Image: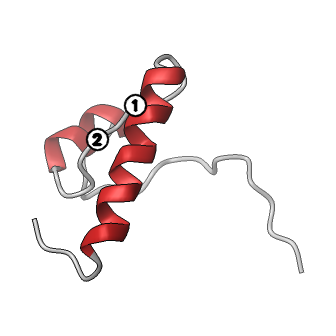
């Protein structure tokens, strides 16, 4: 793994591990570069846009 700020990356990984440990049902950690993990979590193929909006509204 490559990083620009090693100490910051390691500290962030530590924070993520603590969050997962403290709230295991609320947090799922995955690799953003793994297509199979994305497809599993998104419930759709990586190359396809979702069919509906997430319910978020634009402001401004």
Q: Is residue 34 left or right of residue 53?
A: left
Per the rendering, the mark at residue 28 is 1
Question: Who's the residue at 27% across and 55% down the image?
Answer: 32
- Between 47 and 13, the one lying in front of the other is 13
Residue extending furthest top? 25
Identify the secondary structure beneath mark 2: loop
Per the rendering, the mark at residue 60 is none
Q: Is 53 located above or below residue 25 in the figure?
A: below
Q: Quadrant of residue 2?
A: bottom left
Q: Is 46 located above or below residue 18 in the figure?
A: below
Question: Pointers 1 and 2 in contact (CB under 8 A)?
Answer: yes
Question: Who's the residue at 38% across and 57% down the image?
Answer: 11
- Between 53 and 19, the one lying in front of the other is 19
Question: Who's the residue at 34% across and 34% down the image?
Answer: 41
Residue 23 place in picture, x, y as percent: 54, 22
Quarter holding the N terminus is bottom left
Residue extending furthest left? 1
- Between 41 and 49, the one lying in front of the other is 41
Quarter holding the C terminus is bottom right
Per the rendering, the mark at residue 30 is 2
Residue 37 place in picture, x, y as percent: 21, 39
Query: Could one spot residue 46 in this view of the protein?
Result: yes
Q: Residues within 10 Å of mark 1 (few under 14, many from 20)?
A: few
Q: Is 31 located above or below residue 11 in the figure?
A: above
Question: Who's the residue at 34% across and 50% down the image?
Answer: 13
Identify the secondary structure beneath mark 1: loop
Q: Residues within 10 Å of mark 2 (few under 14, many from 20)?
A: few
Between marks 1 and 2, how big is the CA–CA gap?
Answer: 6 Å
């Amino acid at each position: 793994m490559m990083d620009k700020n090693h100490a910051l990356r390691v500290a962030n990984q530590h924070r993520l591990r603590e969050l997962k440990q403290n709230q295991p049902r609320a947090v799922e950690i995955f690799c953003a570069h793994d297509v199979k993990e994305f497809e599993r979590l998104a419930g759709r193929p990586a190359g396809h846009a979702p069919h509906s909006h997430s319910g978020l509204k634009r402001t401004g």
